[in-house]
């Protein structure tokens, strides 16, 4: 890869300033910069700018499986789910490529010690949970772990040092997600260093495409995996490959399912699973009108009450049908350390540009059907986004202890 090969791309997207310091770089650095530029997709900022204000459709409530209904049919669902697990039809996908900037550690979120008297990490909790369900099913459940260029090595090293928490190593498959360029507010790519373009992981919506790029679709086929349970790394009470959830989705005949919690109040800031133009969809808090936020059923329950917790079950054959479809690209204003035009490093105190992400929640709208499966919040939802306060290490510790964990 040389500048003559990448210059046409940069010219096309008006990003030639990325070569401003090219002549000052060593040969090795020049090569690395060209390779990085060749790997980045510069159409992303253009597309994101054009799709940002796309109007949403017409929303309607989506009926789901309440906690009471789930309890009533629990045994039947569990038997069905265990059958699928025993046949090896279910894989788990752990989304662990995020940067965890709000939490602010320089190690992967899954490796942060939550314990007080012993080491307890999100990874140790997830593997313990997965092992429990594997034991119930009588066979190991493969787990695919999405990492990014930034945390692949650290994640792998941590898992190796912990002997994969005694889980069969051949069933723990790490892969890397793609990166997206970071830009200023005008869509101009930023340089993080003279020979390095500012970039960030491209969001959690690219997981299936990244699996494909990593050559893992043939692995799914080889293993006979028909369902993928996709979940976030940062829920300390995450239930992985939960037989009851799997069984409930299979029995419902839906193409997909989502674990949901009942919103505590109309103003809770959580994405809600509902219908949009007749298809399942997730509407973000800030996209809801007051009318939608506060609408209630006759029994007093919120009509739009199913808050998503990033735990989905997708059918592999259905995922294959829309893998070429473009998910919306969301741009978020962030503080991005970069170089100014003269090449001086800038550490902005205020947001100075955009990071670009696709989101797994947007995949739900590509499904014909999705079963909202309500869970008991205290039993299954302890998100860790911040150090203190709401959804934090502190709040997760309390929830874990209340659920009987020794920290
Ligand atoms: P969040 O949206 O909370 O992002 O991720 P984050 O990166 O963990 O944290 P902040 O926003 O920087 O503070 C939700 C889930 O999606 C994964 C995360 O690892 C987490 O499990 N994720 C997020 C990815 O796998 N890749 C990404 O590019 C972004």
Image: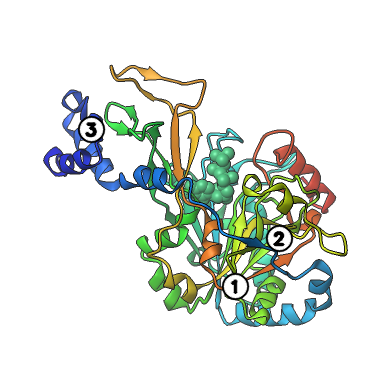
Task: Name the disc covering residue 29, or none.
Answer: 3
Residue depicted at x 25% and y 35%:
15
The residue tagged 1 is: 369
**Horizontal side, residue 205 vs residue 286: left or right:** left
Depth check, mark 1 against mark 2: the one in front is 1
Residue depicted at x 14% and y 44%:
5
Q: Quadrant of residue 34?
A: top left
Mark 2 vs mark 3: which is more N-terminal? 3
Residue 317 vs 192, above or below: the answer is below
**Crowding at mark 2 (Cα within 10 Å: few <14, some 14-19, many 20+):** many
Instruction: Identify the image quadrant of the C terminus.
Output: top right
Its colouring scheme is rainbow
**Crowding at mark 3 (Cα within 10 Å: few <14, some 14-19, many 20+):** some
Mark 1 vs mark 2: which is more N-terminal? 2
**Horizontal side, residue 286 vs residue 7: left or right:** right
Would residue 97 be seen by someone viewing this image from the given angle? no
Residue 156 vs 214, above or below: the answer is above
- Report how far apart the C-alphas of labels 1 and 2 lie in the structure: 15 Å
């Amino acid at each position: 890869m040389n500048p003559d090969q990448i210059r046409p791309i940069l010219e096309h997207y008006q990003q030639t300033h990325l070569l401003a310091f090219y002549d000052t770089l060593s040969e090795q650095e020049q090569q690395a910069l060209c390779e990085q530029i060749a790997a980045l997709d510069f159409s992303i900022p253009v597309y994101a700018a054009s799709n940002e204000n796309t109007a949403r459709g017409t929303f309607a409530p989506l009926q789901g499986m309440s906690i009471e209904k789930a309890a009533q049919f629990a045994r039947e669902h569990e038997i069905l789910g265990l059958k699928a697990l025993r046949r090896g039809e279910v894989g788990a996908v752990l989304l662990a490529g995020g940067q965890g900037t709000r939490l602010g550690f320089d190690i992967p979120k899954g490796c942060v010690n939550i314990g007080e008297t012993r080491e307890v990490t999100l990874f140790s909790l997830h593997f313990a949970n997965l092992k429990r369900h594997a034991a119930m099913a009588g066979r190991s459940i493969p787990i695919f772990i999405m990492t990014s260029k930034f945390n692949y090595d650290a994640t792998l090293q941590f898992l190796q040092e912990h002997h994969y928490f005694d889980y069969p190593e051949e069933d723990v498959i790490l892969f890397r997600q793609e990166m997206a360029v970071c830009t200023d507010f005008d869509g101009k790519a930023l340089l993080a260093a003279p020979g390095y373009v500012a970039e960030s992981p491209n969001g959690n919506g690219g997981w299936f495409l990244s699996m494909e790029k990593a050559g893992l679709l043939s692995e799914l086929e080889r293993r006979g995996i028909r369902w993928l349970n996709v979940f976030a790394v940062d829920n300390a009470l995450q239930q992985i490959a939960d037989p009851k959830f799997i069984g409930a989705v299979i029995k419902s005949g839906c193409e997909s399912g989502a674990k949901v919690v009942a919103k505590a109040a109309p103003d809770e800031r959580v994405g809600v699973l509902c219908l949009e133009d007749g298809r399942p969809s997730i509407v973000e808090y800030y996209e809801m009108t007051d009318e939608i936020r506060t609408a209630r059923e006759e029994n007093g329950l919120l009509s739009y009450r199913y808050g998503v917790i990033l735990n989905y079950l997708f059918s592999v054959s259905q995922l294959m049908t829309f893998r070429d479809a473009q998910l919306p690209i969301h741009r978020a204003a962030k503080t991005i350390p970069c170089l100014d035009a003269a090449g001086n490093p800038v550490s902005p105190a205020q947001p100075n540009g955009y990071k670009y992400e696709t989101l797994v929640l947007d995949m739900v709208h590509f499904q014909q059907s999705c079963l909202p499966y309500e869970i008991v919040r205290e039993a299954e939802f302890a998100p860790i986004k911040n150090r203190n306060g709401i959804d934090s290490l502190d709040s997760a510790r309390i929830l874990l202890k209340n659920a009987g964990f020794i920290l």
